[in-house]
Amino acid sequence: MIDAARDEVARLPGRRLDILHVAACPYPSPQGTQVYLRGLLTAQRRRGHRVRLLSYGFGDGGPTGGVERVGGPTAPLYHRLRAGPDPVRPFLDLALAPALRRLDPDVVHLHNYEAPAVDLLVRRCTGGAGGIPRVYTAHNLMEEELPTYARTPLVAGVARAAGRALDCWIPARADAVVALNPRTAPTLRALGCTSVHVIPPGFDFGDVGRVEPATLPPGAWVVYAGNPDGYQDLDVLYRAMRGLRRARLLIVSAAPRGAFGDRLPPRCRVVRARDFPTVARFLAAATVAALPRGRCSGYPIKLLAYLAMGRATVATEGAVGPTPGVVRVPSGDPVSFRDALAALLDDPERRAALEQAGRAHVRAACRWDAVAAAHDRVYRRVLGHDVQTDAARRYDAARHR
């Protein structure tokens, strides 16, 4: 990606848009989708748009990015931040409907699967969309993710079939679809999406600033920063670490140690971090970073944090494409993962070169203002406007080289 020029960020040619983002999740929260929302919405506000967010009425109390919130639903004594199936969340999702029905923006921008499902229900009940176009961001594909929450093969099979049905139903109902991962775009087109735009996420270096590394015991540390959900394939990392006696595993997560179960490898430390500055301090103190997830139809936001903090990263080929600062290994192969970690730990010069390349890549190619400029082009298209900023044109030209 290419950063937008300063004067283009200050003022978008054409009229100011009223953009309503809808995400059936807590906000704010240090999880990937919420971090993405904060970056995108803040950049859109800088471009002069009115930007509002309809989400659950609770979060972790962290930074919101100054986002204009629309009153969202809450439930007594319920404050769960983690993603995944939950008996309370369908009721919270449905409680988004009244606000969604009464609001009248220029564009409705939907995230994940619950928000567009509620939106379709509202449209069905009100007899149409009222002429307001819908843009959908594909943070994931359900056929890939839903089975990871299952505990038995039978339930996983049912979940996979249900996920496939949702993939066929939800994305194609939008006027335009934003794919975070370029490798997901062909799948979305095969599912019937006629207007697919590849716009990977950005990273806000203001979240990093000057970081004082956390204090860790001497030695090499492999860091994983993220949640313990099944789709993260942490067993691959655990098995790799059991064969890597020269280093210890550091897990930095908003989830407590107990959420990671009893399969943690020996010499593992779990740090609970509820904000990014804490995460950044431990990333700065680690030696290398790990991304064991075997498949990712969205974009692993943690990878941008790893690279921005100068951590050479071992990741799977199923999670990311070729990326500066990243050593890629086959998905689901703990031996290859272990060997790649060991090679980096044994080669400080190569590690330093990867650290520099990864940090430079994020600084040069992952700017939120350029991401927001690319979204402007999508919005103008679905609104019937043939208006495009120079920043969006440069972005598209760079992406198709």
Image (spheres, grey):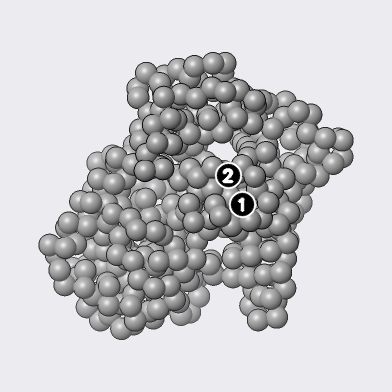
**Residue shown at 80% from the left, 40% from the top:** 122
Rendered image quadrant of residue 250:
bottom left
**Residue shown at 81% from the left, 38% from the top:** 123
Mark 2 Cα within 10 Å, few/some/many (few <14, many 20+)? many
Residue situated furthest bottom in the rendering: 243
Give the label on residue 401, or none: none
Contact flag, marks 1 and 2 (Cβ < 8 Å): yes
**Residue shown at 25% from the left, 45% from the top:** 360
Q: As drawn, is 13 to the left or to the right of 334?
A: right
Q: Depth check: give the residue in front, 277 or 325.
A: 325
Q: As drawn, is 146 to the left or to the right of 321?
A: right
Q: Is residue 342 above or below residue 210?
A: below
| Amino acid type, mark 2 | Val
**Could you say whether the residue bearing mark 1 is in a helix, strand or loop?**
helix
Task: Answer yes or no: is residue 10 visible.
Answer: yes
How far across and down, in percent of the image, does residue 13 sit?
49, 16
How far across and down, in percent of the image, does residue 328 sit?
33, 66
In the picture, the quarter occupied by the C terminus is top left
The residue beneath circle 1 is: 189
In the picture, the quarter occupied by the N terminus is top left
Q: As drawn, is 212 to the left or to the right of 182?
A: left
How far across and down, in percent of the image, does residue 142 sit?
63, 61
Rendered image quadrant of residue 100:
top right
Work out how far the residue at label 1 is from the one at label 2, CA to CA, in angstroms.
7 Å
**Could you say whether the residue bearing mark 2 is in a helix, strand or loop?**
strand
Give the label on residue 196, or none: 2
